[in-house]
Each structure stands twice: as C-alpha cells, then as structure tokens.
Image (spheres, grey):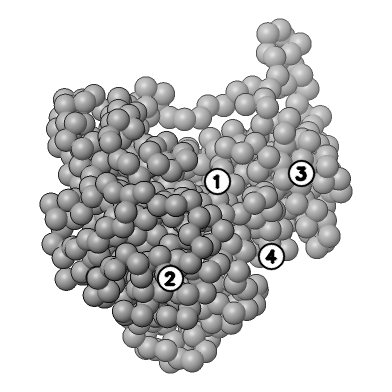
Amino acid sequence: MISIGVLTRGKYGLRLIENIRNNSGFKVSSLEVPESLPDFIESPAEFIKGLDLDKTFFSNDLIIAYIMHPDLAPEIVRLAGENKAHAVIIAGSAAIAGGRDELLNLSKKYGIHIEIHEICCDIGQSGNNTVTGFATCFGRPQIHITTKDGLISTVKVIRGAPCGSTWHMAKNLVGSKIDEAPAKGGLLVQQYPCRAIRGTKGGIHKAAKFHKEAVEKALKESDYMKGSIYERSLKFHEAHQGKIALKSKVSLKTKDDLSLAYTPGVAQACLRIQSNRDDIYRYTSKGNFVAVVSDGTSVLGLGDLGGYAALPVMEGKAALFKVFAGVDAFPICLDTRDTEEVINTIKNIAPAFGGINLEDIGAPRCFEIEERLKGLLDIPVFHDDQHGAALVMLAGLINALKVVGKKFCDIKVVISGAGAAATASAKLLLDECVRDIIICDSTGIIYEGRARLNPYKEELARLTNKNRIMGNLADAMKGADVFIGLSVGGIVSEEMIRSMSDDAIVLPLANPIPEIMPEKAKEAGARIVGSGRSDCPNQINNALGFPGIFRGTLDVRARDINKEMKMAAANTLALLVTEPSEEMIIPSIFDHEVAPRVASAVALAAMESGVARKRVSPEEVARHTRELVRDQ
C-alpha cells in the first residue's frame, strides 16, 4: 500500500485528503503550513525549522505539496529526500516560478523523483512506480460510460481529479443527453469548488478541457458509439449503393459527338496506338487509371473474406485515390486464391492501366505476386499493405525520434508481425541504419536457424536480430526504444510497455483493434503513441501515402515505384509537420498539401533515379495535383 503525505496550506489540499480516503485504499496523512505566508522568504530552511514540522511526515512514499509558494518548494524536496520519500509532487503554478532547475538538482542529489503540476488533474503515469501507483486512481480523468435511449445511464470513474471534481461530474452527468454530455461535463467541473484550479492561472479552463475530453473519449468507446458507427456505415453503403461511379469526360449530345468519341472516328486513335504503343498515353485515360486489385485473402483485420466481400474496401480505396489526388482507380476483386491466376489476370488487364495497386492479398503470396508482376509489366506495381504502411510509419518515426532526441543508429526496434507491412517496415528501417531490430511472429522471436520459417521469414532472420535473441514478444520488448505493431489486437500488456526504455515510442497499428489501446500505452509510460485509429492523435494511415505516390508516379509515367521514391514520400510526410510534438508526429489526412507535396517529391525521385519516362517539373506536378483535388 502506498503511503501518501499531503502538505496543506489552509484549505488547499483538504479535498485531496478526503478524496483519497473515500476513493482508494492508500494510506494518507497530512501536515499543515500556515495559510498566511510572506511573499518572500529569505531563509526557507530557518522558516521551515520555525514551523516545527513533524519530520516523520516526510518519510511517506509520496509527498504532495499544496504549499503554493516557490521559496518553500526546495526545502520540502530536501526534507523528503533526507527522509527517504520516493517521490514529491509539487502542486500549483506558484511553485514553478524560477525554481524548476533548483528542484531538479535536488532530485538528482537525493535520488528522489519530482513532478511539478500546475493542476493535479494533469497527473499521469510516469517512470516512477510510486507516482504511477497513485495515478492508477488519481490524475488525468478517465471514465467509463454506458448509455440507454440516447441518455447517459451510468458513469464510472476509473481515474479522477484528486480534488474530487471527476466524481462530482460523474454523478451529475447521469440522465444527460449523449450529444450534450461533453460540454456539460466541462461545465460541471468549472462549477466545482476546487481551490487549486481556481488559484492557478487558466487552471479552471484546463481542468474543464481534461474532463470534456474524458467524456468524449468514453462515449467513443461506449457500446452506443461502437454500435452506431457500424450501423451508420452500413446504412451509408446501402443508401449510395457503393462509393464510386464512372463519369464521362466528354459531351455526347449530337451525332458528331458520337462519331468523334466512338465509331467511326475512334478508329484513328486505335491505329495510332497500334503503330506506336506509347501513344496510348496520348489518346486514352491510361495515364490516370490505376487498378486496385485484391483476392480478398487478407481484408483489413478481418482475415480471408474472399473477393466478393473485399469490394467495399476496394471501392473505398478508389474513392480516396480520386478525392485526395484525382487518380481514377478501379476496384477489381478476384474470385481466386490461385497465385498463377492472380498474376495472369493482372498481366492480361494491364494494358488499360497506368499502375497496379495490390491490396489485401495475404502473405507470403503477396511477395511473390508483386515480385513477378514487377518483372512482367512496364507499369508500376505497388503493394500498399507493404510499402504504403511502411513509409507512413517511417515518416511518423522520423518525427517521433526528433521529439525524444534519439537517432536511428542508436535505437532498438521491436516489430510484432512478420507479414507484408512488417517485412517492408523492417527493410526501410535497415535502410535508415537501424542496427537492432527484432521481429516476432505468432510463434515468437524470429532468429536465424529457427525451424519452419518460410523463405521470406528466413530472409528477415538473416537481416535482423544479429544477437540471435530467443523468446516471446515480452522478452523482445525489454529495453526497446520503439515498438511497431503490425499483427493482431490486444497482444501487448501495460507491463510490456513498462519494460521498454525511457521515452519509448509505441506504434500499435493493427486494425480495427490495436495491439494495445493508445491510452493504455500512455498510462504505462510510453512517451509517444501512434495508431491506425482516427479517434486518437498520430493516426498512421496509408491514405497519407498512396494517393500522392501514385499521382507523382503517373505524372512522370514511371516504370516502377522504387526505394528512392518511397523514401522521398516518407521524408516529405515527415517534413510536413513543421513542429513535431508528442501528439503531432504525422500530418492530418485532411491537410490539402499532403498529396501535392508527396506527388512532387515522388516525381522528382523517379526522374533522378531513372525510372521516369516523362520529364515534368516538380512544381508542375504539385500544381496539377492541387488542381485535381480542388475539382473534387
């Protein structure tokens, strides 16, 4: 049991003491300093000595100081350090004024963990076990909501503000309308008589914001919202009977129109193409057509659904191509799982397309299909589940490493999954000079010499895990700087996150359920978390990559999408975030500059690497992309 000592000043801290006793099993004691203190205390040590405080109080595991005076904060830390307390939380903005460096020096001197919080409803999981234990009950608010008939039926507090405002909000939210609940939650906290947040500049607004966000998050995770998104999506698909349609670029209102577009005039275009195949780009839409091809063997996180059930996903992909980059993409779903049939079908339809996007084809067949098609066709073949996922992940990781101050050559990376995306991600990281990569599949850590590896996993074993570490995912993650999840949901525990290095970067990218929920990873101590979810910060989504990549590729008629082009896309995505932060390592999908900038960079890389058949200035590619996007 954690013992907590609360240093109060007048009524500051009294609510915390009451709240700890009512809502946890922690042992709590208190010590009071006078409410009236001079503005300047020349000798804090003598002043504290004159108060004749009980020194045994400072031997509690955790000291929470509501003294609200910067001159006394260092002396409190010194007393806590001398009496072997594990951690000190300094509450209130007054304690921050000018004394942070002195407090940190005392922390190092006495080996005591210090945290400074303007308001205590900002406390979260940390690298200190005592603070982390306290934060399981108190700190940044977290609640669970159930609903019935459009109203809030229950609100359970998982973690609440130390002052008790979260419990007050929870009690008074019951019966509220769902759409009004977030705003009401913030208002209830603003009305709550917490002296600490009212004594801190901006504190009341921050506390309200934290609680409003907690309500929004709980609603997103509630049965109501989980059910409604799927129901609404089903109705959406039914109402539109799909998401794409074919539209004529030309008018067909007269006989002359018809004779130009079709017989007899169309014959001349046919003859020109027969005599010079490259003229197909001049006289047809081939240069803007992409086939989105799937056999349905690995659809999202749903598994092998087959070609028919894959069509909604392929239609969605085609819509993204059009809306974000003006690319005309066609969903083609194959009713076969035979590798030869897939390859031959794509080969035989290739004349109509300027590029092939392979989608949701299971590993390891996807590797062979892509490799062989690249050798057979003179148009780019791009398996987005591999390369798109990898390059967007890399863009986010570039910025995440900037935030935590680490370098690629110094980090240990653990990848969960050994399929298409994981394989491509590992190879991109190797190109970035990451020396220490461990990959885990459903059996455990992949290492050279492990039995029953397919040829693609054997290659991964040769390229990674140079120390031949064996064991399971938990063993691999000990001391890791980066975790990349490209496997299945729910396989990473909070304990596994806690075993990682300081400032850990956690990217659980499995969909629709990640390997660990982002908030759980944060609570367990991860510094930066990204996921594939649109309801969390740092969404690592392929849609940031493939529209612009194909736009740039098509505009210069590239034969391939090579490594140089992929790296150009990744670096450009990273640079689009001008000031990376813990919650902003990747641009938004709805940033209108994403596709133009990516297309421009990819086109330039294609020309410089010799795979472009047409030279177009990067500026023109960007302008063209913006024009196409504006027309949507």
Of the image marks 2 and 4, the number of the one nearer the N terminus: 2
Q: CA distance from mark 3 to mark 4?
A: 18 Å
Residue for badge 2:
45
Of the image marks 1 and 4, the number of the one nearer the N terminus: 1
The disc at residue 563 is: 4
The disc at residue 543 is: 1
Q: On the rendered structure, is 514 left or right of 602?
A: left
Q: On the rendered structure, is 3 left or right of 94?
A: left
Q: On the rendered structure, is 237 left or right of 502?
A: left
Task: Using the image, determine if residue 548 lies above or below residue 375.
Answer: above
Q: Are marks 2 and 3 in contact (CB under 8 Å)?
A: no
Q: Position of residue 474 (x, y in %)?
A: 33, 77
Q: What kind of residue is marked 2? A: Ala
Q: CA distance from mark 1 to mark 4?
A: 19 Å
Residue for badge 3:
555
Residue at the image point whose x is 59% and y is 47% from the top: 587
Residue density around tag 4, few if under 14, some if 14–19, many if 20 or more, within 10 Å? some
Q: What kind of residue is marked 4? A: Lys
Residue at the image point whose x is 64% and y is 51% from the top: 579
Residue density around tag 3, few if under 14, some if 14–19, many if 20 or more, within 10 Å? many
SS category of the residue bearing label 4: helix
Q: CA distance from mark 2 to mark 1?
A: 60 Å
Of the image marks 2 and 1, the number of the one nearer the N terminus: 2
Quadrant placement of the C terminus: top right
Residue density around tag 1, few if under 14, some if 14–19, many if 20 or more, within 10 Å? many
Q: CA distance from mark 2 to mark 3?
A: 72 Å
